[in-house]
Amino acid sequence: MGAGGFCRLPNGDVVVALNLPDPGAAPATRTEPGARVRVLVVAGNRARALTRLRNLGLRSVYLRGNLAPPTPDEITAVLHHPDGLVWRTAPDDDAELWHPIRSLLRHGTGPRRPAPRVKSA
């Protein structure tokens, strides 16, 4: 698991930041150090923040320690987003903009829905 961390806000909410392998990348490039994304999520507590990510299909998301807490700029970005869940591909590049989580999961990594059943006559 990549580095991550959290920060408690004055109102009691928590911002969790995680560096994860890019779920949209090909499996061969997921192990490369450059194929990573920084994901930020705001929730009532750390468990709820991780549950939000797991419910979106990122099943093996854990936060162990506080090695890479969110910066003040990252906290501002996630608080100003309506969903409270953003990502970007280059955590060290401040010039890249934050994206909504839907654009990351559009690559087919989201939860699978069963095919609708058709009644036979």
Image (spheres, rainbow, N blue to C red):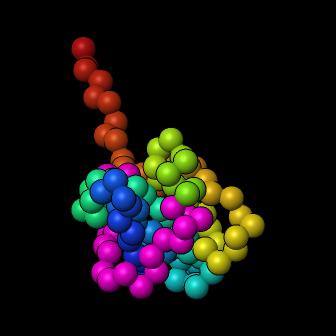
* 46 on left or right of 6: left
Q: Quadrant of residue 2?
A: bottom left
Could you tell me if residue 8 is visible in this image? yes
Residue 24, percent from left and from top: 55, 62
- The range drawn in magenta is 55-75
Does the magenta portion include 67?
Answer: yes
Residue sitting at x 36%, y 47%: 112
Q: Nearer the viewer, residue 4 or 118?
A: 4
Residue 64, percent from left and from top: 30, 81
Residue sitting at x 62%, y 68%: 89
Does the magenta portion include 54?
Answer: no
Q: Nearer the viewer, residue 87 or 115?
A: 87
Q: How many marks?
A: 0
Residue 97, percent from left and from top: 68, 59
Q: Which residue appears farthest toward the right when viewing the image?
A: 95
Q: Nearer the viewer, residue 31 or 52?
A: 52
Could you tell me if residue 22 is visible in this image? no
* 97 on left or right of 84: right
* 34 on left or right of 84: right
Q: Quadrant of the N terminus?
A: bottom left
Location of residue 43 with respect to 46 vertically, above or below: above
Overall secondary structure of the magenta section? loop
Q: Nearer the viewer, residue 114 or 22?
A: 22
Residue 101, percent from left and from top: 51, 52
